[in-house]
Amino acid sequence: MIKLPESLQYRLNKRISQGNYRTLKHYSPCAVDFISNDYLGFSRDLVFQKELLHVVVANPKLLTGSTGSRLISGNSELIEDIETNIASLHKVEAALLFGSGYQANLALFGNLPTSKDTVIVDELIHRSVHDGCLLSKARKWKFKHNNLQDLERLLKKASGEVYIAIESLYSMDGDLAPLEQICVLARRYGAFLIVDEAHAIGVYGLGRVYSLALQDQVFATLVTYGKAMGVHGAAVLASHKVINSLINYATSFIYSTAITELMAVSIDKAYQHLFNYLDVIDKLQFVISTYHSLAPVWIRTTPGPIQTIFLSNIKDKVCLVSELETANISTCIIVWPTVAVGTERIRICLHAFNTQKDIISLFNIINKHYESN
């Protein structure tokens, strides 16, 4: 066996000693799902699966690879037509498809700002934004989560071109950004606002930027399709000039093998399925309301499908996890470094298919392990 570098072995041992060593797990498809980002249930929807299968059977060539980057051999009229359709649906000038939201954020923040510019990010922004800022070498400042006063304090002293990075629905805390107020601040200080809608697309129809009609005030929007939309990939929504700048300068776009036509078609079909079954959004909202009505008073609730139960309120975390597994309930324990030390939590994802019985079973177990602080 090849010897590991000592620094790598040290870091692995440190993770183990701290109790946050990550391993890959299998989750039973038969378990009660409070863990996946499949908020609308599209990934398990048999009607949607048959729609995708029909497309593949009619055109088996969709199953093959794209053969190269978009700038070499990986582009096609079909992908461009779907990007045009996505832009039209969201009422923006243009869209550019990526293999993942992570890749799209690397493109946005790694290539639009320069080392002379300032990127002001919400302190709870996704890791991919931080990594993008490293690529561009832009100054990166954090403002306190959803704190408009702190954001304005930083805007007043920022130099160069100024970018603001937020999520419309936060992936770990589950709360909403004050989008309209942040748009006002961005306009007042001439900043470029970039909104990550990874967890909002589908849950809020075409996203919160669309539902609030803020397209003309947002510099660029990121939507992803691997969560509520039930497929995979992502798109940046922006002006033609912003999209063309990504095509010319975004290294994660230029040097990546293009998405397949199958991925593009599945995204297009996901939009169609959403429009055909808009009532599923109401079903999800009903589940969220049911969760709110059944939640013990000590549990914090949020307006969206992402709920959190802080482990500081749990007296025996190991026993709780074991009991949830025994009851065939899938949840996710989030610890440092994904979240700050002291804010470790159970992340509960609600879905349109969750039942009142599922939620009652979850709370019955969690209540047994509650410890008043």
Image (spheres, helix red, strand yellow):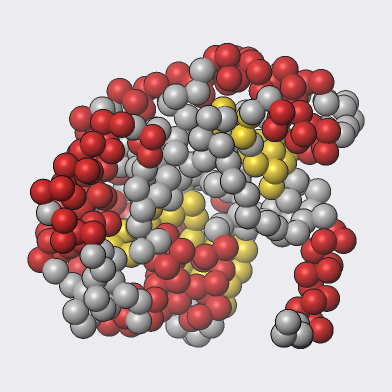
Q: Residue at x 32, y 36 (%)?
A: 205
Residue 119 at x, y percent in the picture: 51, 70
Image quarter of residue 122: bottom right
Residue 192 at x, y percent in the picture: 40, 65
Q: Residue at x 79, y 73 (%)?
A: 11
Q: Residue at x 53, y 30 (%)?
A: 30
Report the label total: 0
Image quarter of residue 140: bottom right
Residue 233 at x, y percent in the picture: 35, 57
Left or right relative to 298: residue 269: left
Left or right relative to 371: residue 264: left
Image quarter of residue 240: bottom left
Residue 349 at x, y percent in the picture: 55, 35
The reply to whether residue 287 is in sight is yes
Up/down of 125 relative to 208, above or below: below
> Which is more toward the observer, 326 or 226?
326
Up/down of 34 relative to 334, above or below: above
The reply to whether residue 243 is in sight is no
Q: Residue at x 58, y 19 (%)?
A: 358
- Which quarter shows the C terminus? top right
